[in-house]
Image (spheres, rainbow, N blue to C red):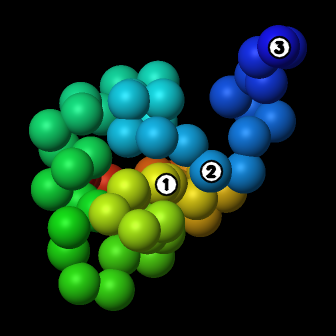
Amino acid sequence: MKEVPIKDKLNLTIEEAAYSNIGVNKLGELTKQPKCPFVIYIGRKRLIKRREFEKFIENQIEI
């Protein structure tokens, strides 16, 4: 099975999103916030919408 590069994925796991130099624990905290703009739940699994996450990071001064 061929692996899809992160840049081509629409949704990322928290571990995959850690490429942004934001740690797994901090990403977990951010995605647990109400109305987080870049999280999607598939059952109990949390995924990060890559495009929205990148926009969120671009607009932040401090995380």
Which residue type does callout 1 highlight?
Ile
| Residue carrying label 3 | 1
Disc nearer the start of the sequence (1/2): 2
Q: Is residue 59 visible?
A: no
User: Callout 1: 10 Å neighbours few (<14), some, many (20+)?
Assistant: many
Q: Residue at x 24, y 33 (%)?
A: 24
Which residue type does callout 3 highlight?
Met
Q: Residue at x 27, y 46 (%)?
A: 27
Left or right: 31 in relation to 59? left
Q: Is residue 37 visible?
A: yes
Which residue type does callout 2 highlight?
Asn
Q: Residue at x 33, y 86 (%)?
A: 35
Residue sitting nearer the eye, 2 or 17: 2
Disc nearer the start of the sequence (3/1): 3
Give me the disc on residue 11.
2
Callouts 1 and 2 close, C-beta under 8 Å: yes
Left or right: 34 in relation to 38? left
Is disc 1 placed on a helix, strand or loop? Answer: strand
